[in-house]
Image (tube, rainbow, N blue to C red):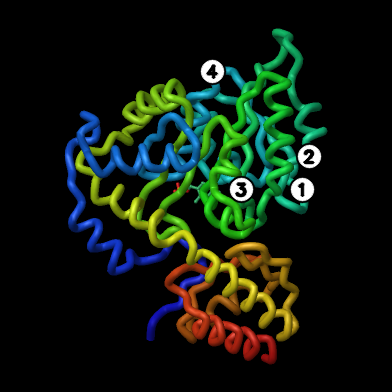
Amino acid sequence: MTVIDLRSDTVTQPSAGMREAMANAPMGDDVYGEDPSVNKLESELALRLGFASALFVPTGTMSNLLALMAHCGRGDEYIVGQQAHTYKYEGGGAAVLGSIQPQPLEVQADGSLDLAQVVAAIKPDDFHFARTRLLALENTMQGKVLPVEYLAAASRLTREHGLALHLDGARLYNAAVKLGVDASDITRHFDSVSVCLSKGLGAPVGSVLCGTAELIGKARRLRKMVGGGMRQAGQLAAAGLYALDHQVERLADDHANAQFLAEGLRAAGYEVEPVQTNMVYVQVDERAEALKAFAAEEGIRLSAAPRLRMVTHMDVSHSQIEHVIAVFTEFSRQ
Ligand SMILES: *Cc1c(COP(=O)(O)O)cnc(C)c1O
């Protein structure tokens, strides 16, 4: 039985074309700056997203950490969503390794931060306070897409107040495909952007941090410090390049499958949140563990959470979603 894994879009296997691109990738020692495939990925993505420079890193967590540490010094502060990945899901790395104080704000229903609350959270220039240096946004935020007008307003606000603006764009391309815009129409509002290649884009490993030459220079130094300087990383970079060239437009299929799943579950009586991209949130409350076990018997891997997240990706087909809907329907009748 092939397993239908809906826990995350990180679980994809490299496609045949991607494996071939990886096998044929030219390689060198990237700590010496001599890996042609890594150099190509960095220059290509910087160009596409409108930045001077870029840095290939093993994970999105490291990419965000390097960005926060490159923007903020010890005792500086960044404003961030209470539910944001950098604040909640990265082991407190910015605080542990960067001595950066987070100022979390509640995320609004649409995934944005209230800009009036952001302004109110910026500390005055007074020695009692940490120095507020940076605003970090996330897009998509739990599958929700931030409107480009909002990004423009956030950009104006940060410039007016002398802050930098960072985007955790782990799923930047889901946002761009959903809006039908070029990814650069999103990224041009930011001073730095982190993009995951290992989520919906389907690469096995890797993220890229984009920014100014100065910022990326600092991040390169920090990457070495935290042990992220890789040697012949070209095969991984080649997977990323292949994903950017061949596996962006197909994210629309994942979004359609997520809509289809949400509609099927609603028809079966489940309470499902509105779906924008590739994430479906369904309220299963105290049935979470039982549902997980029931689905596992039918070849479906789920997390166990009262507010259950299911994520569509390139290794889940439309007909497999039909099976998932049938299994959930059966479970609800028990
Ligand atoms: C996955 C993810 C990251 C980075 O995760 P890694 O597992 O470290 O690559 C960062 N931000 C968001 C929003 C993510 O979903």
Residue 174 placement, left or right of 147: left
Residues under labels 1 and 4: Cα distance? 29 Å
Which image quarter holds the N terminus? bottom left
Residue 74 percent across, percent down from the top left: 54, 18
Q: Residue 114 bears which disc, if any?
A: 2
Which residue matches tag 1?
A: 108
> Dot 3, crowdedness within 10 Å: few (<14), some or many (≥20)?
many
Query: At label 2, which amino acid type do we have?
Result: Asp
Relative side of 96 to 17, left or right: right
Q: Which residue is under mark 4?
A: 74
Q: What kind of residue is marked 3?
A: Asn
Q: Residues within 10 Å of mark 2 (few under 14, many from 20)?
A: some
Query: Where 279 sits versus 118, above or below?
Result: below
Q: As drawn, is 197 to the left or to the right of 290? A: left
At which x and y percent is residue 327?
58, 87
Q: Quadrant of the C terminus?
A: bottom right
Q: Earlier in the sequence, mark 4 or mark 3?
A: 4
Say what amino acid the circle numbered 4 marks. Answer: Arg
Quickly name the residue at label 3. 139
Spatial distance from mark 2 to mark 4, Cα to Cα? 26 Å
**Mark sitting earlier along the chain (1/4):** 4
- Front residue (pair 267, 48): 48
Q: Disc 2 or 3, which lies upstream in sequence?
A: 2
Measure the C-alpha gap from mark 2 to mark 1. Answer: 7 Å
Quarter of the view holding residue 231: top left
Residue at coordinates 58% horizontally, 68% vertically from top-left?
A: 255
Above/below status of 322 relative to 127: below
User: Is the residue 7 above or below the residue 204 in the image?
Assistant: below
- Label 3, label 1: how far apart the Cα atoms are: 13 Å
Query: Is residue 281 visible in this depiction of the protein?
Result: yes
Q: CA distance from mark 2 to mark 3?
A: 15 Å
